[in-house]
Amino acid sequence: MMAKINPRLLPADKLAEVIELRENADKQQRVLRESLTDSVKQAKDFWSSLEENVSAFGHTTKGYADSASRVLDKIDDAKHRFSDILDPDCGDPVDLIKEGRVNILNIAELSERQANAGLSYYLQELLQHRKESVWERKGKSTHRKNYKFLAPIFVIIEEAHVFIPKGDHTDTKYWASKVAREGRKFGIGLCVVSQRPRNIDPNVLSQMGSLAIMKIVQDDDQQQIASAAESLSKDLLSQLSSLNIGDAVLIGQWTNLPSIVHIDEMKSKKSGSDLNAVSEWSQTDKFKDIAKETTQGLIQKDLLLD
């Protein structure tokens, strides 16, 4: 499903990320913060109401006219560029998640900052709903009768090094860490997938109870994995660079001892795999003509040189 972000549900700092205000643009950040009132969030036309408040703040607050004008430009740009993503009338995006099914959240159209804001919102809400579900069934909560998720949830984050980076703070990293620490008590699991484990926050990586390690060549990637998996021997570590396609080392709770397994190739339609550029070119008619002309030209040139 296409990722949706409802700007009504976001605090000002998250909306600033979504419409791509610069983090160090303090005046623009204040304009948005002061303009995003409860009445705006409840207005029938969210964007128009927000723009009116921003314009009014710029006119009535000394020294903020230019900043308000820039915020208006950012809002207008976001409305047109991300109209399929930013939807103030979509309700709660979490409602789109269906229990008992695999739900794939497509964030390809989102910028990195937007994806961070969106994923952190999903993680926060999923964790809170699972907490409410468990607390209510144990008789510890009475204020949310219609919790959304009766069954446990398993969240998989692809390209985890982007959203849970080592050394940098992101909201997704904060909530992923919280889910990794607390989720098992409330029936929400977390899986992180990455080809660059050296760039994943080690605190989150160390919370993973099981690891599936495929071919890893870089030493720093191997050392990051070794630090997160105490049961990974030096012999197995040395074999990671020579694993074949589909081979993986399983470590952790899903196997008594570290084991090397082979995963069968998926025969159905693949997505996300590398394109075969040579094959694509060979199937493109217009490139065939170009190749023929170029080859003939080289032949003529060689003949002339002879």
Image (cartoon, grey):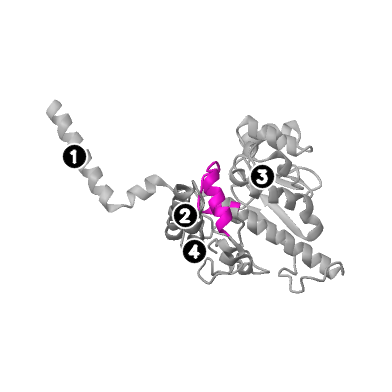
Left or right: 61 in relation to 229: left
Spot occupied by residue 123 in the image (x, y as percentages of width and height): 67, 56
Check disc 2 and give the amino acid type.
His
Marks counted in the figure total: 4
Indicate which label's residue lies in the foreground, 2 or 3. Answer: 2
| Residue furthest left in the image | 304
Indicate which label's residue lies in the foreground, 1 or 2. Answer: 2
Mark pair 3, 1: CA separation: 49 Å
Tag 2 or tag 1, which sits nearer the N-term?
A: 2
Tag 4 or tag 3, which sits nearer the N-term?
A: 4
Q: Which residue is mark 4?
A: 47
Spot occupied by residue 210 in the image (x, y as percentages of width and height): 75, 47
Mark pair 1, 2: CA separation: 69 Å
Disc 1 packing (10 Å; few <14; some 14–19; many ≥20): few
Tag 4 or tag 1, which sits nearer the N-term?
A: 4
Magenta stretch in the rendered image: 13-36
Q: Which residue is mark 2?
A: 59
Of residues 186 and 65, the one nearer the viewer is 65
Q: Which quadrant of the view contains residue 93?
A: bottom right
Quadrant assignment for the N terminus:
bottom right
Check disc 1 and give the amino acid type.
Gln
